Amino acid sequence: MSKNKLYNYFLIEFLKNYLVLLLAFSLIIWVTQAVRLLDLITQDGNSIITYIKYSILQFPRIFSKISMLFFFIGLFWTILKFEESNELRVIWLIGISKKNFKNFLYKACFLLIFIIIILKNFIVPYSNKYSRDLLLNTELESFQNLIKENNFNNPAKDVTLYIEKKNTINEYKNIFFFEKKEKGSRVIIAKNGSFFSKKENLLIFSEDIILKYQQEKKPTKANFDKLSIDISSFVKKKTDYFKFSEILSEDLFYKFLYDENFNQKLGSLSQLNQRIIYPFFLLILIQVLSFLFYPQVMNLNYLGFKYFVFIYGFILIMGLELFSNLLSKSIIYSILLYFYFLLPYIVNKFFLRKINE
């Protein structure tokens, strides 16, 4: 078997292990999160279609978030399988040096780094931004799910609703409704209320209704036996803030270069580090896993040596995740991030060189 065929064989086996693990755990996490996101329907009043779209848009973020961990696990698993089946020994016997094999892994890794950078810089930010816009711009689908009894509720923008009691079929007792408008406000007080949903979502007030208007400093008051409000005209509550993960990469570069607000600059730099610098940590993980090629040089049995390598790599990945949560706190953490890349690289290179002497 030629050297190139062995290289390709190892790479294919690794990719199979890596992608199966990554896809399987991404789906598990995605399903778990999709269950948690049911609150978008039950508490936030979104439609089922909006919920499905929003849930699907979360998958690229989950996929990219765990890609590094399962790169490490997938490569670790592949090397152990080759070692246990003596296939690594065959690779060394046909004349492929351990140094050349590591260089092959580095070259293959650069292609994966490029793919992850594309994913983090274009696909994930777009899906994050689109999912946020989806929640902000869709109409209010369900109003009654947002209402709790004996509580002041804010189910829509500039709307406050209080009900004393609520039964299982969404009939209400003792209702106070307040709506703020551009030129005034509207107050409705009623003894009973309910929803009617057929073609339109109507909130029906009945019995002892008092309607008060406050427009241009001219209050008016009227009494009715029955009154309805079309809630489809209400606007969902919207947040004025955004997350840096929801900003497209070109906008992040612009904010970092030209925004006068230091916190905005720092947040942009933090997110750019995560999108561009983080993927190169895969090269350090290859260094760590290269120790598995030299089990005989450690004063440990092979099982203990495998555990040592795995725990060492896992700690490095967890440390990187810790930095991801701290980068936006201070510029110092961004500087420490580069040292965090440099220090393991130097230490690993020193010991690998010692081993090869």
Image (cartoon, helix red, strand yellow):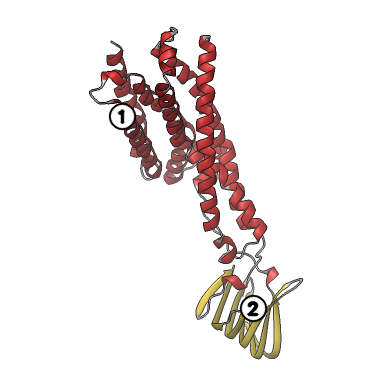
Q: Which residue is mark 2?
A: 216
Q: Quadrant of residue 352?
A: top left
Q: Is residue 254 visible?
A: no
Of residues 163 and 93, the one nearer the viewer is: 93
Q: Residue at x 43, y 39 (%)?
A: 270
Query: If you read the primary sequence from the N terminus, does the residue marked by circle 2 or circle 1 appear first?
Result: 2
Q: Residue at x 62, y 76 (%)?
A: 184
* Numbered circle sitting on residue 193: none
Residue type, mark 1 in image: Leu
Q: Are discs 2 and 1 less than 8 Å apart at CB?
A: no
Q: How many marks?
A: 2
Q: Secondary structure at mark 1?
A: helix
How packed mark 1 is, by other alpha carbons closer than 10 Å (few <14, some 14-19, many 20 or more), is few
Residue type, mark 2 in image: Glu
Of residues 22 and 43, the one nearer the viewer is: 22
Q: Residue at x 56, y 32 (%)?
A: 118
Residue 262, percent from left and from top: 42, 44
Q: Residue at x 51, y 37 (%)?
A: 22
Of residues 103 and 240, the one nearer the viewer is: 103
Residue 42, percent from left and from top: 57, 66
Residue 30, percent from left and from top: 54, 48
* Numbered circle sitting on residue 303: 1
The answer to whether 354 appears left or right of 105 in the picture is left
Give the CA distance from mark 2 to mark 1: 81 Å
Q: Secondary structure at mark 2?
A: loop
Residue 192, percent from left and from top: 62, 87
The vertical placement of 77 against 332, above or below, is: above
Q: Is residue 32 visible?
A: yes
The answer to whether 63 appears left or right of 266 in the picture is right
Of residues 233 and 61, the one nearer the viewer is: 61
